[in-house]
Amino acid sequence: SQQGEEDPQALSIQEGENATMNCSYKTSINNLQWYRQNSGRGLVHLILIRSNEREKHSGRLRVTLDTSKKSSSLLITASRAADTASYFCATAPNTGGFKTIFGAGTRLFVKA
Amino acid sequence: SQTIHQWPATLVQPVGSPLSLECTVEGTSNPNLYWYRQAAGRGLQLLFYSVGIGQISSEVPQNLSASRPQDRQFILSSKKLLLSDSGFYLCAWTRGTGESGANVLTFGAGSRLTVL
């Protein structure tokens, strides 16, 4: 079963608006990551937040992590048409091993 | 710098035919290697991962197999393709366990397989 589940499945906003995507997961984790995928391409790593961190920033990206609720959010501020892509959360369980498990993703469409 | 190459980019194969997708990583040694599959509009399903030459772990029972004949080469194969094998296959690598950034996956550009 999927470790991470993103919400919403799809999001359409105007350029300049903020986009918020949420992710919930089921088991205890070492870290949580967000990736971006342009249509028909490979995924690109955006940001990693460790289980002992609550918030992390990278440029226009802000990620929060609430381990008590087993949830994370990705905020993209001042969105641009070039941000149009699918965004995935991925979790690495703290049981060890090498399995990074991905959610189904949120498809973001930013209208110019 | 490290790079990952994956080929072929696109493949159309008849049901029952064999499959071979290749992936190589440059600029690093002893990487962890992964094969994921993505169905249209869906998330990624982990198929195989490898922590060293000849060491393969399978996540999903299926008619696919993987091999790692060299440290930086990972091959996905099938003897007889099924319609359900159609999808977007992604190879990825991470640094070895214990190294900084060990969990961060770097993906190849993907191979789109259509089985007819």
Image: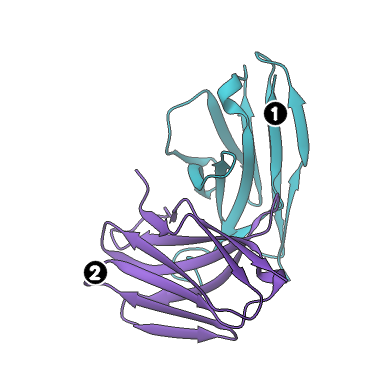
Q: Is residue B80 above or below residue A71?
A: above
Label 2, secondary structure: give it. Answer: loop
Residue A80 is marked as: none
Q: Is residue B100 visible?
A: no
Return the x and y of residue B100 as percentages of the image width and height. Answer: 50, 75
Return the x and y of residue B28 as percentages of the image width and height. Answer: 66, 64
Q: Amino acid at mark 1?
A: Thr
Which residue sits furthest top?
B16
**Chain identifier matching the purple colour in the rendered picture:** A
Q: Quadrant where the C terminus of chain A lies?
A: bottom right
**Chain identifier matching the cyan colour in the rendered picture:** B
Q: Amino acid at mark 2?
A: Lys
Counting labels gives: 2
Q: Nearer the viewer, residue B99 or B78?
A: B78
Q: Nearer the viewer, residue A28 or A72?
A: A72
Where is mark 1, residue-wise? B114
